[in-house]
Amino acid sequence: GENVEQHPSTLSVQEGDSAVIKCTYSDSASNYFPWYKQELGKRPQLIIDIRSNVGEKKDQRIAVTLNKTAKHFSLHITETQPEDSAVYFCAARSNSGYALNFGKGTSLLVTP
Amino acid sequence: KAGVTQTPRYLIKTRGQQVTLSCSPISGHRSVSWYQQTPGQGLQFLFEYFSETQRNKGNFPGRFSGRQFSNSRSEMNVSTLELGDSALYLCASSGSSGGNIQYFGAGTRLSVL
């Protein structure tokens, strides 16, 4: 089955700096790659996603890039703010349904 | 539109017991997926139901089972509970109207003593 690896597991940045989280996947049939943000005690919420026919997608301070050849994708957060502090999960979908295979998460801390 | 609703929010059980968790998807969504979240393993996929049929299954033992009803509500059952089953169980619903996105419920926190 699909295996998603995520790095780093923890990341600490100063407010205003950029943060980058990287994921790799194993199944070349994977075609959908979402990123979820989970704040402490809350449910995961989708922040951005990308499909396999697109190389990059941006939404304000957040961007995702996908390299299908290398089977990796990355989340970029610019001008980080303390409210960006949370656990971020990458995921990949390779089957016929909607279910996702998740990475183990990155705990991001943005210090003022 | 109401979001994904999971009940109960908290459960305490003892080893050997069984438990049933419930998930009501967003209206119109026919797919419900279940995940187990633990601090060490992140979010692990259990199974997905679509139109009352199990469509995909993760790598969990047969003690974990589920079903979906005609109104798309889903239940997950864990029999012969073990200490390692303590986790947050999340369900997510999806539908064509949502463009493939999985919307998560708040989860059920299960503690096995």
Image (cartoon, coloured by chain):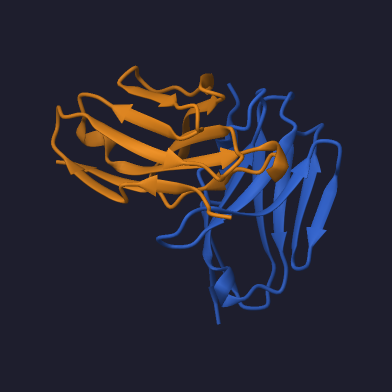
Residue toward you, A48 or B39: A48
Image coordinates of residue A103 in percent, x first then y, are 55, 41
- Asked whether, in this view, residue B50 is left or right of residue A20, the answer is left
Q: Percent x, y for residue A81?
A: 62, 76
Which residue is drawn at the image coordinates 55% and 82% (left, top)?
Answer: A112
Q: Residue at x 77, y 34 (%)?
A: A70
- As drawn, the residue found furthest toward the front would be B71
Residue B41 shows up from this direction: no
Q: Using the image as rendered, state which of residue B78 and residue A50 is in the foreground.
A: B78
- Establish if A73 lies above or below A42: above
Q: Where does the N terminus of chain A fall, quadrant-wise?
A: top right
Q: Colour of chain B?
A: orange
Decide if residue A46 is in sight here. Answer: yes
Q: Residue at x 85, y 44 (%)?
A: A55
Q: Is residue A108 above or below residue A24?
A: below
Q: Name which quarter of the figure residue B29 lies in.
A: top right
What residue do we see at 27% from left, 40% from top? Answer: B86
Q: Nearer the viewer, residue B83 or A112?
A: B83
Return the residue found at the far bottom.
A112
Where residue A66 appears, x then y in whole percent? 79, 43
Q: How many marks?
A: 0
Q: Measuring from the top left, give residue A62's x and y in whole percent.
A: 73, 62
Q: Colour of chain A?
A: blue
Residue B50 in the figure: left or right of residue A28 = left
